[in-house]
Image (cartoon, grey):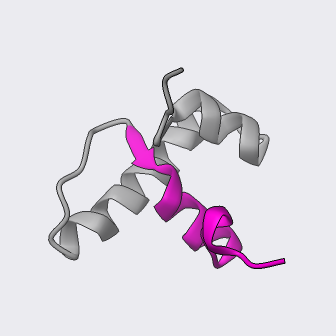
Amino acid sequence: MKSNFMMNAEDVANALGVSKGHAYKVIRELNDELSDQGFIIVAGKVPKAFWEKKFFGYHSEKVAI
């Protein structure tokens, strides 16, 4: 079973309820922030962990219930 650690434009568009074009804009902004912090980025994709941190304030696997 393959785990997908990256979100693409379709994933972002579905999560936010926006068009793919707007999703690419959001991904570009998040990737610019990662790049400024010295991380290597993949164009058109954003790491799920960073997505969760920016939109929800945490990483789902580290939350204690």
In the picture provided, is 57 more to the left or to the right than 51? Answer: right
Residue situated in front as seen by the camera: 53 or 59: 59
Residue at the (29%, 66%) spot, across then down: 34
Residue 30, magenta (yes or no): no
Q: Is residue 38 above or below residue 18?
A: below
Numbered circles on residues, count: 0
In the rendered image, the quadrant that contains the C terminus is bottom right
Q: Establish if 58 lies above or below 20.
A: below
Residue beneath the point at 50% across and 32% down:
3
Taking the spot 74% from the left edge, 35% from the top edge, the residue there is 14
Nearer-the-camera pick, 13 or 63: 63
Q: Residue 15: x, y in percent? A: 74, 44
Looking at the picture, does residue 47 appear above or below residue 5? below
Residue 12 in which image quadrant = top right
In the orientation shown, which residue stands out farthest toward the right?
65
> Which residue occupies the extreme top position in the image?
1
Q: Quadrant of residue 53?
A: bottom right
- Does the segment drawn in magenta span residue 55? yes
Image location (x, y in percent) of residue 32:
29, 62
Q: Which residue is at a point 22% across and 76% down the rendered structure image?
A: 37
Which image quadrant for residue 17? top right
**Whole-percent x, y for residue 57 in the image:** 65, 79
Span shown in magenta: 45-65
Q: Nearer the viewer, residue 12 or 4?
A: 4
Residue 12 shown left or right of residue 25 in the figure: right
Quadrant of the frame with the N terminus:
top right
Give the x, y percent position of residue 2. 49, 24
